[in-house]
Image (cartoon, rainbow, N blue to C red):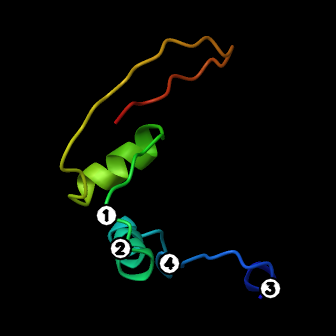
Amino acid sequence: MYLQNLGISYIFGGKERLNFTVVVEKLKNLFSIDKLMLEGGGFLNGSFLNEGLIDELSLVLVPIADGASKLCDTI
């Protein structure tokens, strides 16, 4: 109710886990959003790819040194 009182729209994308197919369908049906641009890492990109939600891909890799010892996946 807090977000509604502030006039902020939100959606739920699944019960047990985030279901990106449900999210994309709700964005289309409730807000008429037909195109999305993902700016995420391997988890987000891979999830959309695994659920068959990507029909066009432009991948931009930018080398960044953040000091972390762990490597991140792109997809």
Horizontally, is 74 left or right of 13 in the view?
left
Pick whichever of labels 1 and 3 is earlier in the sequence: 3
Residue that lies at the very extreme toward the bottom in this rendered image:
1
Pick whichever of labels 2 and 4 is earlier in the sequence: 4
Disc 4 element:
loop
Q: Are marks 2 and 1 in contact (CB under 8 Å)?
A: yes
Question: At 38% from the left edge and 53% from the top edge, which residue is drawn?
Answer: 36
Tell me the kind of residue under disc 2.
Lys
Disc 1 element:
loop
Tell me the kind of residue under disc 1.
Asp
Measure how far apart labels 4 and 3 are at the Cα level.
26 Å
Tell me the kind of residue under disc 4.
Glu
Question: At 57% from the left edge and 13% from the top edge, which residue is drawn?
Answer: 64
The mark lying in front, picked from 4 and 3, is: 3
Horizontally, is 68 left or right of 22 in the view?
right
Measure how far apart labels 4 and 1 are at the Cα level.
26 Å
Q: Which label sits on residue 18? A: none
